Every structure is written in C-alpha cells, then in structure tokens.
Image (cartoon, rainbow, N blue to C red):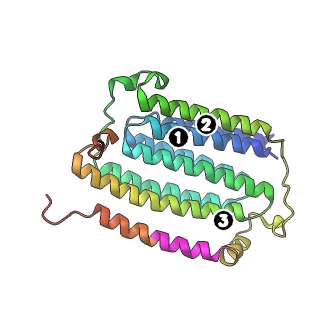
Amino acid sequence: MPETFVFYAFSTVAVLASALVIGQRNPMYSVLLLIAALGALSGLYIQLDAPFVAVAQIIIYAGAIMVLFLFVVMLLNAPREDAAEWDRSHPLRQPGIGRFGALLATLLLVQLAWALMEVNAIDAPVGSRSDAGTVGSVAEMGRVLFTRHTFAFEATSVLILVAMVGAVVLARREDGEA
Amino acid sequence: MIPLSYYLIVSAVLFAIGTAGVFLRRNLITILLSIEIMLSAVNLSFVAFGRYAGDLDGQIITFFVMTVAAAEAAVGLALVIALFRQRESLNPDAFTSLRW
C-alpha cells in the first residue's frame, strides 16, 4: 500500500528530525533539522487532503520563521551550549528540575498513548456537515475564513501588529548603550 | 485510508519531544525551537481531526496557530537578543537576577 508507506516514511522523518533537534548542542543544526521535520509534516498534510496548509507550512514555517531563527543564531554567533556536568548523565538521574521535566514528559507520553489506545480505529471521514465534500478546496476555505471566522482573522492582524511593535521595542538598542 | 489514531500518535510523540526539549535543553534558542515543535504537533492533530470530521475548521485554525507561532518567534527572538546583550549567554541559568 503506497499510502501507508508514505505515511510511515513522513512520520518517521518528522519524529527522528524532531528528536535530533533537541539532541543537538549546536543551535544551527537544530534549526536546519527542524526545517526537515516541518517539511515531513507538510507531506502528512498533503496526505490529509490539506494542500494549502502544506504549502503555507513550507512558506511560513520553513521559509519565514526558520529564516528568522537562523538569522538570530548567526547574529548572536551561536555559542555552543555549555554542558553542565550533570547534563551528560541520564535525564532521569539529574537533580531537581531536570528530573522533574523528564518525568513530566514521560508521563505525558504515557498518558497520551493510553488515551489514544482508547480511540476506536476511525479510518474513514465521519463528517456530516455541508462542507464535508469540499475539504481541501482552497476556494471553499477562503469563503469559510472570511465568513464564519472573520473576527478571528481580524484579531490575528491586531496580534501581528502588537508582536511587531513588541519585537522592535525589545530588540532596540538604547541610546548611550555600547 | 490511514486510521485517525495513527496521526494522533505521531502528533503525541512530537508534542512529547517538544516538551522534553523545553525542560532538558540549556539554550534559549533550542527551547524556542521546541515550542515550535509542540505547535506543529498540535497543527497536525487539528488537520487530522478536521479531515476525519469532514469540515474545514481544522485547517482554518491551523493558520491561526501558525500566526501565533510567527508572533511568538518574533517576540521570543527579540527577547533572546536583548538578554544576550545583557549577559553574553544563552543559558537560561544565567538569567536568575529575580530569583530570591
């Protein structure tokens, strides 16, 4: 089944690349690996009949946001992470917050896996809404976005404006500072 | 068609990886990247649910999540730059002046 094969290929790449993102000490490699993970995710979106989301993912995430990250990594001359002594031991044997975080993440994974075991195997769309047949149609998506979700769309533009002003103010160099 | 739970499992694994990254890494930039991983995992489950529920809301909300991710990256990186200027370090343990 090519469909199953494609699913496994993309999800393996996504999970492996994400695991390597947090396994790197050099932030430059982390950023590049995250781009690979996002590309694999957009392959999954295409399989889910969401081509527009897939393209937007590539353009916005892998294009814009990751370039921003890369730019900052290069601007700061990305010092390699200074490893504490305890950092080389297993996460579960680290003191304090590290052990707590590792336990919390493991617990979350177990809880999510348990919850997913309870889900019955749904392998066909179950929708009965009027737009059930048009999933993936970009024209229909635009119509829904600008009718049912107009307020959220407008609020988003305010959010972006606030974020832009905030970023400029935060990163500005004060007068008199070196 | 691939069962819905497969996509949800991938999403859950990605989210757990992101959570582990936030707690385990000692680099502000990698922590921000872990947050991006978590947001992408949530996006995947939104799109999968939307596909299997047969409506477009799952894809629409993905765009809002992407917008929030972009805003978060911009503000977060501006903070990282400001902090790096103060301490010449990206280690979160260097920024403990407010700890009592």
Residue under label 3: B60
Q: Check the residue under mark 3 and report the chain it is in.
A: B
- Compared with A167, B97 (above or below) is above
What residue is rendered at 66% in x and 65% in y? Answer: B60
Q: Amino acid at mark 3?
A: Ile
Q: Residues within 10 Å of mark 3 (few under 14, many from 20)?
A: many
Q: Which residues are magenta?
A: A149-160
Q: Which mark is residue A108?
A: 2
Q: Amino acid at mark 1?
A: Thr
- Overall secondary structure of the magenta stretch? helix
Nearer-the-camera pick, A48 or A94: A94
Lateral position of residue A103 relative to residue A51, left or right = left
Q: Which mark is residue B19?
A: 1
Spatial CA span between label 1 and label 2: 9 Å
Q: Position of residue B50 (x, y in %)?
A: 74, 58
Res. B65 image quadrant? bottom right
Does the rendering let one see residue A157?
A: yes
Same subunit under labels 1 and 3? yes
Q: Position of residue A29 (x, y in %)?
A: 42, 40
